Image (cartoon, helix red, strand yellow):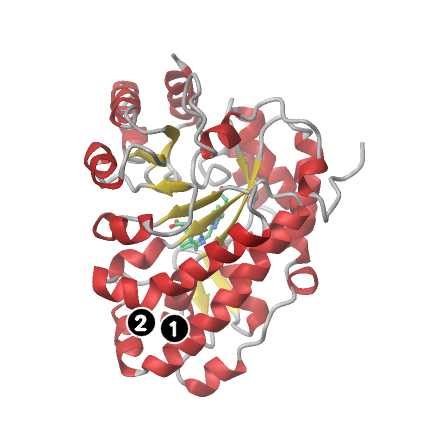
Amino acid sequence: MGLPRADCPHKGSPMTNDLFLRACSGESISRPPVWMMRQAGRYMAEYRALRAQHSILEMIKDPELAAEVTLQPIKAFPLDAAIIFADILTLLEPMGLQLEFISGKGPVFHNPIRDAADVAALKPIDPRRDLGFTLDAIQLTRERLAGQVPLIGFSGAPYTLACYAIEGGGSKDFDQVRAWMYAHPKIWTDLMDKLTEGVTDYLLAQIASGAQAVHLFDSWAVSMSQADYRRQVAPWTRRIFETLAREAPDVPRIHFSANGGHLLEAIAEMPVDVLGLDWRVDAKAAIQKLGTHRVYQGNLDPARMLASDEAVIEGAREVKQAFSGAKAHIFNLGHGIIKTTPTDRVRLLIEEVRKA
Ligand code: CP3
């Protein structure tokens, strides 16, 4: 069987499990599909074994390894979707930022953005030339999945990328980024324009390579007030979703923001198919506020997975119940899986979700 045609993502194998895609389009289905943010990662011994021999960037940049890691959780657990193994930060490298993952510290950019000249120097990306490793990994993974479950592509949202680019790495609440934004309103919009163009081209290329849904991570949007989110972030995020809706209307769009409770109304105005909720958001209240006509994703507290079998089962039931009033629900953790999560609990959680 050949690769799915790059210009025709829907010509891959017929899907044997399309529960996730049906939930994305709001079909009422017998049980919520389930996958987990960061489902390929250090909590799995198979991942740690490969990681002992390769850096994270080596794994991402080798399509064979990236495809293998993407498939590790699919082979180990009865999940309903795969997500391509990559990182939101690799997009910034070809734009000109030097990325390194430092063990114990996390990601670092050695030449963070400081001024207008740095923004002007950011290069436009050509996804095939600059990020072809992820596009090839998507094609390989689709081929190997052979329709078993759908494959999700993703990107960081412009604001979250700007956070890392300006801060030069992680931060508790990115104070420096907001300070910079208030101090340099014109340069801010130039930066957001450039990031938006990069993210849009990257996601369209992922779709052309076979991604069957796209997930936008705006992890740090939480650091914004609602008014600033609407002014300084939402217009650019919206532009991405509008372009995707126009260019790839059949590919579901998912938005996720960590702890974006106070931003939910603004986020819900975006043209997305699925709203991801962080574990701190009260699902019932959110559905009441935003409407039962939507599709939601979430939101088990990842910390429950470390506690006990009972805590997982109880949490899974609670989450299913909380979302039962929505048009459709995609079961997920309320943020990425924690690296000390026992794999038995992952299995237990999926079994519990799959119970009618
Ligand atoms: O979900 C998946 O399984 C797909 C792969 C994926 C990774 N990162 C792999 C990864 C996805 C979707 C991401 C997204 C990502 N990356 C986000 C947004 C999601 C979120 O958590 O809010 C962010 C903010 C990043 C940036 C990033 N990448 C950080 C802060 C770190 C260090 C984290 C740590 O605990 O050390 C990474 C590295 C990273 N990306 C790992 C994985 C599996 C751990 C790498 C390792 O050391 O093996």
Query: Crowdedness of circle 1 by 10 Å Cα count: few (<14), some, many (20+)?
Result: many
Label 2 near label 1: C-beta < 8 Å? Answer: yes
Q: Nearer the viewer, residue 106 or 39?
A: 39
Horizontal side of residue 264 vs 110, given as left or right: left
**The quarter of the displayed image where residue 288 is located:** top left
Q: Position of residue 145 (x, y in %)?
A: 66, 31
**Earlier along the polypeptide chain: callout 1 or callout 2?**
1
Report the quarter where the C terminus lies: top left
* Mark 2 element type: helix
Horizontal side of residue 66 vs 186, given as left or right: right
Pointer 1 residue Cβ closer than 8 Å to ligand 1: no
Q: Nearer the viewer, residue 189 or 95?
A: 189
Q: Is residue 56 above or below residue 309?
A: below
**The quarter of the displayed image where residue 324 is located:** top left
Outermost residue toward the right?
1
What residue is drawn where x is 32% and y is 80%? 185
> Which residue has dot 1 on it?
166
* Mark 1 element type: helix
Q: Nearer the viewer, residue 270 or 355?
A: 270
> Which residue has dot 2 on it?
177
Q: Position of residue 276 (x, y in %)?
A: 36, 41
Q: Nearer the viewer, residue 188 or 122?
A: 188
Report the quarter where the N terminus lies: top right
**Can residue 62 be spotted in the picture?**
no
Residue kind at label 1, given as amino acid type = Ile
